């Protein structure tokens, strides 16, 4: 069975009150294969393993194990980055909830972390919701959604500081050059050390690690087009030395650029 980390864009959700599916990007998934989506429902993503970088409303949200992201109706969102992510994704209409008053004024995404036993409980909860969805058990789904919403802290969000959001948005933007720490710090009007500290505190990764990830994501996309010479791919990700690029790519992915290209063609 083909694994899809996102909803089927051909699926008609306009008449559905609730849907859920497993999220699985442990097989190779290119983020450019995942279209920008708009749901006629309130969307959600719950991550049980790995991480997903989701951009919605112009803001990137890094979802790690135990994190849930709730997205308002008809808000465009896109996936910027996957790292062996598993979990659940779906959506629900306000009419599927017993008391929808809490949703009436939802205009911005909500990002929340569940920790330890609570995260384990939420993973099992979403698995039960998936089973109920396949069984068409609307009574359990309604009660389940009420329980889910009661555990959300609506007054808080885990959105990163603006400098971190700007950095993540810029480094994963395919239309912008991939820069170095100093350039990103100057763009934000703060010092290198302060940006480094903010990014590390907010995401658990250094600026350099995110730059390397963005380079690999962009390189994979370009290498999938066999008409682009490897030397041009290297330049496009900010590494002019083709030999250094090949060593860097192999260190991160376990394959040379040529080997990766052949595997994509196969």
Image (cartoon, rainbow, N blue to C red):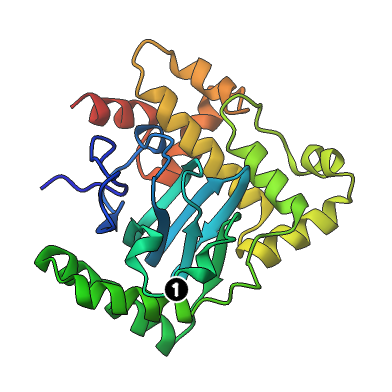
Query: Residue 128, can we see it?
Result: no
The C terminus appears in which quarter of the rendering? Answer: top left
Q: Please give left or right for residue 182 compared with residue 119 in the image.
A: right
Q: Under tag 1, what secondary structure?
A: loop
Q: Please give left or right for residue 104 compared with residue 92 in the image.
A: right
Residue at figure coordinates x 48%, y 38% from the top left: 216
Q: Which residue is nearer to you in this view: 187 or 257?
A: 187
Residue with the mark numbered 1? 66
Q: Is residue 61 above or below residue 100?
A: above
Residue 251: x %, y % from top left: 45, 45
Q: Which residue is nearer to you in this view: 102 or 128?
A: 102
Residue at figure coordinates x 54%, y 62% from the top left: 104
Query: Residue 175, can we see it?
Result: yes
Residue at figure coordinates x 58%, y 38% from the top left: 172
Residue 195: x %, y % from top left: 79, 54
Q: Is residue 111 above or below residue 113?
A: above
């Amino acid at each position: 069975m083909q694994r899809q980390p996102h909803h089927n864009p051909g699926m008609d959700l306009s008449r559905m009150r609730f849907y859920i599916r497993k999220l699985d990007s442990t097989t190779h998934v290119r983020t450019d294969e995942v279209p920008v989506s708009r749901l006629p429902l309130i969307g959600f993503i719950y991550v049980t393993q790995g991480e997903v970088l989701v951009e919605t409303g112009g803001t990137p949200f890094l979802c790690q194990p135990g994190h849930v992201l709730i997205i308002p109706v008809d808000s465009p969102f896109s996936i910027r980055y996957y790292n062996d992510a598993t979990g659940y994704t779906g959506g629900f209409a306000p009419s599927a909830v017993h008391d929808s008053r809490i949703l009436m004024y939802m205009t911005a995404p909500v990002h929340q972390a569940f920790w330890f036993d609570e995260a384990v409980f939420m993973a099992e909860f979403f698995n039960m919701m998936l089973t109920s969805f396949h069984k068409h058990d609307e009574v359990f789904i309604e009660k389940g959604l009420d329980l889910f919403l009661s555990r959300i802290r609506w007054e808080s969000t885990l959105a990163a500081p603006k400098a971190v959001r700007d950095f993540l948005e810029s480094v994963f933007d395919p239309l912008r050059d991939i820069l170095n720490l100093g350039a990103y710090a100057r763009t934000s009007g703060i010092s290198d050390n302060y940006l480094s500290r903010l990014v590390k505190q907010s995401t658990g990764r250094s600026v350099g690690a995110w730059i390397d990830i963005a380079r690999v994501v962009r390189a994979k996309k370009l290498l999938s087009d066999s008409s682009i010479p490897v030397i041009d791919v290297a330049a496009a990700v900010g590494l002019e030395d083709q030999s250094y690029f090949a060593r860097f790519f192999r260190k991160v992915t376990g394959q040379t650029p040529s080997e990766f290209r052949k595997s994509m063609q196969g």
